[in-house]
Image (cartoon, coloured by chain):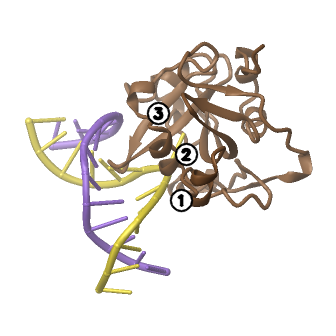
Chain colours: A brown, B yellow, C purple
DNA sequence: ACGAAGATTGGCT
DNA sequence: GCCAATCTTCGTC
């Protein structure tokens, strides 16, 4: 019996998926962690999104596909950013910024508290580009913990000052008082 | 074909 | 708190 999240979880409104992802369990091999922080990127209208104005490139083409796929890319030449595509048709996605590791040792080191640290810890790189989280044998999401609505808080996204009015949108979601949020 | 900038992090002026 | 590291991707020459 599997608790894996199905396609239908991802092919919904992106802001809703971003909120619902909190508390879910990301599993890869023998490593796993609970999602504690996400950010939503809303396709063509969002200046902070790579798909702003419907711009489709070699890098971001996967977000134009259906929801539930991995959009991963290298930033600053050093860090990988792990995103999950959402919606059916719209080029939208959710950036997973931080995890609460399951194992004690990783918890103490806060090894997944930040988008770059998270991918380092899980060994995620371009090899996972386009991976289907609803079908993959090596990476997927499970039901995880249930987070009460009043434990979910929102705020402006991080590192996108160039996006002008879109930089103020409160599309970053995280679990209140969780120590693993970046 | 070339150059600028980036959804970050960690170390030190 | 500020700045360098590091390299792929994209826009432009």
Q: Is residue A153 above or below residue A121?
A: below
Do we see residue A56 in this rendering?
no
- Residue A56: x and y, percent? 45, 25
Q: Quadrant of the C terminus of chain A?
A: bottom right
Percent across and percent down for residue A50 are 49, 37
Asked if residue A140 can be seen in this view, the reply is: yes
Q: Which comes before the other along the chain, label 2 or label 3?
A: 2
Instruction: Tell me the CA gap for discs 3 and 1.
Output: 21 Å
- Give the residue at x 78% y 61%: A177
Q: Secondary structure at mark 2?
A: loop
The answer for how far apart the CA atoms under marks 2 and 3 are is 16 Å
In terms of sequence position, does the residue under pointer 1 or pointer 2 come before the other?
2
Q: Earlier in the sequence, mark 3 or mark 1?
A: 3
Give the image quarter of residue A74. top left
Q: Nearer the viewer, mark 3 or mark 1?
A: 3
Q: Chain of mark 1?
A: A
Q: Are marks 1 and 2 in contact (CB under 8 Å)?
A: no
Chain letter behind tag 2: A
Q: Name the residue located 73 percent from the left edge and 16 percent from the top edge.
A: A6
User: In front here: A81 or A32?
Assistant: A32
Q: Is residue A79 left or right of residue A132?
A: left
Residue named by callout 2: A48
Question: Would you name the residue on which mark 3 appears?
Answer: A72
User: Is disc 3 placed on a helix, strand or loop?
Assistant: strand
Q: In which chain is the residue bearing label 3?
A: A
Residue A10, located in which quarter of the rendered image?
top right
Q: Is residue A116 above or below residue A14?
A: below
Q: Which mark is residue A161?
A: 1
Q: Is residue A178 left or right of residue A93?
A: right
């Amino acid at each position: 019996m599997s608790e894996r999240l199905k396609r239908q979880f991802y092919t919904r409104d992106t802001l809703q998926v971003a909120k619902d992802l909190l508390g879910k369990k990301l599993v890869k091999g023998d490593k796993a962690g609970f999602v504690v922080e996400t950010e939503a990127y809303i396709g063509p209208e969002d200046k902070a999104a790579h798909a702003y104005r419907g711009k489709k490139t070699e890098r971001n083409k996967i977000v134009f596909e259906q929801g539930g796929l991995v959009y991963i890319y290298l930033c600053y030449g050093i860090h990988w950013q792990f995103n999950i595509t959402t919606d059916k048709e719209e080029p939208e996605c959710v950036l997973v910024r931080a995890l609460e590791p399951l194992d004690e040792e990783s918890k103490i080191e806060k090894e997944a508290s930040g988008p770059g640290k998270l991918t380092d810890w899980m060994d995620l790189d371009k090899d996972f580009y386009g991976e289907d989280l609803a079908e993959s044998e090596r990476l997927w999401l499970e039901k995880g913990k249930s987070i009460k609505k009043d434990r979910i808080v929102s705020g402006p996204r991080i590192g996108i000052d160039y996006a002008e009015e879109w930089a103020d949108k409160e599309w970053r979601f995280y679990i209140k008082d969780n120590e693993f949020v970046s």
